[in-house]
Image: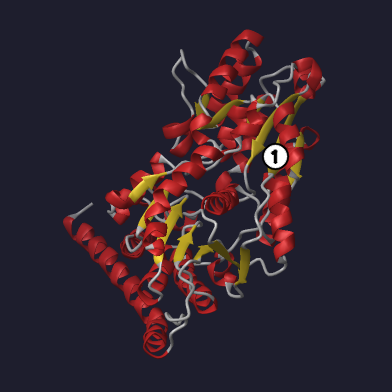
Amino acid sequence: MSIFTRFFFWQLRVASFFATLWLFLVLLFPLFVLTLIRKLILNRHDADSEDKSEITVGIFHPYCNAGAGGERVLWAAIRALQSNYENVHIYIYTGDLDYDRETILNNVEKVFGMKMQDNINIVYLHRRKWIESQQYPVCTLLAQSIGSIYLGWEAYTLFKPDIFIDTMGYPFTYPIFKYIGGCKVASYTHYPIISTDMLDRVAQRTSAHNNRQAIVKSVVLTNMKLGYYYCLAFLYSLAGRTADIVMVNSSWTRKHIDSIWKCPQRTHLLYPPCDVEKLLQLPILKDEYKNDDIRIVSVSQFRPEKDHALMLKIFNNVRSVVDDETWKKMHLVLIGSCRDKGDESYVDRLKQFTEKLDITNNVEFKVNIPYPQLISELQRGTIGLHTMWNEHFGISVVDGLASGLIMIANKSGGPKDDIIDTRSETRNGFLATDVNEYTQMITSVLNMTLEERGKIQHSARKSVDRFSSKTFERELVRILEPFFKVKQK
């Protein structure tokens, strides 16, 4: 590439950066004007009448009824606060308008086996569509970030808490609650909205669910997208570092948050709560109690980034390397929750792909199943399958280890950095990257002796205590204790 061409594309990136920044500021200007007016004229809390003994905690989780791993974090955090502070009152900001408080709490007990105390209030947000990706066909991440500010503003105007905690990863809401509301702000980040890995994929022109072929094929569009990403990363860092306490769910997430937000002294690694206590109590069933079925189980929310299509390709490839008798016994069981119609459409497309591969009779879809049925499926399984690239952590991977599945996970993100140990003497699972590697791992597990499988299962169960709900709740309270000390003083 000539010097002139390089200079041209450098100018293009700079122009993209400043164009995105300008757009961001122009769209937000009316909000900041309203904010200043509100700050000068209105005072939502009369300091003289405020109950000093009561601590109000607002938790921003627009999809609190989704029933996935992120929601387990939410409800475990609430349980920890309820158990340790008698004077705490919880307010959950959610856009789940179709569910009343009792239904939401009943679902928590049904899906996660957690019974909540009564001091929970639901604050309903009517603008959740502002953060939904299907609303924005282009510049999706930037548009969602701007939308989260308007949604955060709605949350603030409905209720201003003493402590604001974001458990879904919307840092553009933090300045509202911190600088306008005077709240203490904490965040729990599952996955950075922008990362160096994403930048590398675009720069290398690698196709992905968030990097379309049209962009991959065009050098100009690739450089424009890189400029846009650099701008978004800059804005993301400004918003994120306003949090007083930052919690991240894995070493992988911490690496990216530290590199973007640049506040490592306020950042804490806190593994998400996994239901290992109950799962470790399950007896590992022998093959004869499973009717000699070979069930490959996947537990993950039905979203494109979880890459269920890769699971189907792997399973189809396994058919070509096993004998007919073995194939008849094999079932791929896809378990997960659907948040909305977009997720339901995604499941329909997966079913169509299953038909195209002609493996329908061997694939089962278990959507939004209750917790006892999930436990049963884990216990009946032989192999656990995980395929998401750069999964931030991988609660389902831990659940699989604890329940006795032989886990095969993607060689990236949390599973690689924190969960799966592939050293021969302490192996608790396997890592793979593509169809052929996954197929090889699955067939090797099928060919193992009971003793070989038992050794891996024993190591797996020994490795999961650090991911328990008790450990999460204890560490969460320790990290957030400064907030409550200040309030109590």
Tell me where residue 396 appears, x and y as whole percent: 59, 38
Residue sitting nearer the eye, 467 or 457: 467
Quick check: 73 above or below 4?
above
The residue lying at 29 percent from left, 72 percent from top is 18
Quick check: 137 above or below 200?
below
Tell me where residue 390 appears, x and y as whole percent: 46, 42
The residue lying at 43 percent from left, 85 percent from top is 43
Residue sitting nearer the eye, 431 or 164: 164
Tell me where residue 280 appears, x and y as whole percent: 63, 27
Residue 422 visible here: yes
The residue lying at 70 percent from left, 64 percent from top is 101
Pointer 1 residue: 334
Q: Tell me if mark 1 has few (under 14), some (14-19) or many (20+) residues whose alpha carbon lies within 10 angstroms of its own.
A: many
The residue lying at 71 percent from left, 22 percent from top is 283
Quick check: 303 above or below 162?
above
Q: Position of 278 compared to 186: left or right?
A: right
Q: Position of 25 compared to 215: left or right?
A: left
Q: Secondary structure at mark 1?
A: strand
